[in-house]
Image (cartoon, grey):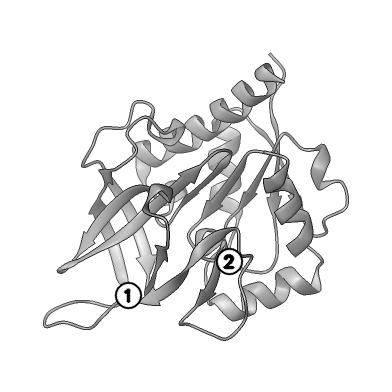
């Protein structure tokens, strides 16, 4: 079977090498893209990212990605956001003043300080699967361990977007979202060992299944 073609958007928001390698190990043909021309020709789109919300959105705007990403979501092109790539899907963030992509109604908020709580939330933590039938979680057990690095967490207005949560101190935060062809993880699957590689494989399989249904 022909490998699925994935566009990994490069907008100067972190090292993309690990994400690309993980997707390639899952059998995808991966291409880094720095401009939106031809985005619609790919089988799926991946938006990774580390760093701060405002610079990321400024880069996406300057490179002309904002409307093409929204159009990709409207046409049900499979989409995977990773870490900052999840947060920019929201309308706004407490981290800055730039508007987000506005694909998911809601806001990104900073963790509330509490005694003994480390901010950023960094390291391994467990998933609670709130959408256990999501394509992200095929073969992934509840309470699986994955790797996080973030100081802000997304709060969707509509809780049906939430595909998994995790616990940081007394705060329950969104670990993944999913609705239709839009999937995104706050954690880094490419840094999460065999579990993370399986999640990337699940996305590649989801893209392949979407192609088979068209």
* Residue 184 image point, x, y percent: 49, 50
Tell me the quadrant of the picture where the C terminus can be found.
Answer: top right
Which element type, helix, strand or loop, lies under badge 1? Answer: loop
Residue at (78% x, 55% y) in the render:
68
Query: In the current view of this chain or complex, which residue is farthest to the front?
Result: 158
Looking at the image, is 156 positioned above or below residue 109?
A: above
Residue at (52% x, 67% y) in the render:
50
Give the residue at mark 2. Answer: 14
Q: Nearer the viewer, mark 1 or mark 2?
A: 1
Q: Residues within 10 Å of mark 1 (few under 14, many from 20)?
A: few
Judge left or right: residue 130 versus residue 190. Answer: left
Give the residue at mark 1. Answer: 120
Looking at the image, is 209 positioned above or below residue 144?
A: above
* Residue 111 image point, x, y percent: 30, 76
* Residue 40 image point, x, y percent: 81, 42
Looking at the image, is 168 positioned above or below residue 120?
A: above
Q: Residues within 10 Å of mark 2 (few under 14, many from 20)?
A: few
Judge left or right: residue 134 versus residue 10. Answer: left
Judge left or right: residue 74 versus residue 183. Answer: right
């Amino acid at each position: 079977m022909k490998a699925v073609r994935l566009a990994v958007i490069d907008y100067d928001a972190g090292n993309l090498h690990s994400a690309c390698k993980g997707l390639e190990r899952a059998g995808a043909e991966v291409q880094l893209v720095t401009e939106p021309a031809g985005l619609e020709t790919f089988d799926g789109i991946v938006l990774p990212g580390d760093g701060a919300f405002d610079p990321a959105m400024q880069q996406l705007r300057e490179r002309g990605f904002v409307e093409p990403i929204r159009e990709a979501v409207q046409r049900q092109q499979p989409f995977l956001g990773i870490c900052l790539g999840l947060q920019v899907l929201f309308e706004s963030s407490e981290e800055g003043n730039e508007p987000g992509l506005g694909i998911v109604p809601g806001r990104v908020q900073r963790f509330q300080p509490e005694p003994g709580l480390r901010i950023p939330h960094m390291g391994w933590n467990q998933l609670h699967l709130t959408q256990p039938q999501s394509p992200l979680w095929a073969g992934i057990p509840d309470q699986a361990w994955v790797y996080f690095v973030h100081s802000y967490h997304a709060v969707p207005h509509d809780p049906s977007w939430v595909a998994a949560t995790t616990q940081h101190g007394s705060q329950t935060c969104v670990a993944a979202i999913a609705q239709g062809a839009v999937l995104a993880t706050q954690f880094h699957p490419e840094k999460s060992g065999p579990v993370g590689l399986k999640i990337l494989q699940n996305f590649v399989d989801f893209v392949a299944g979407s192609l088979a249904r068209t």
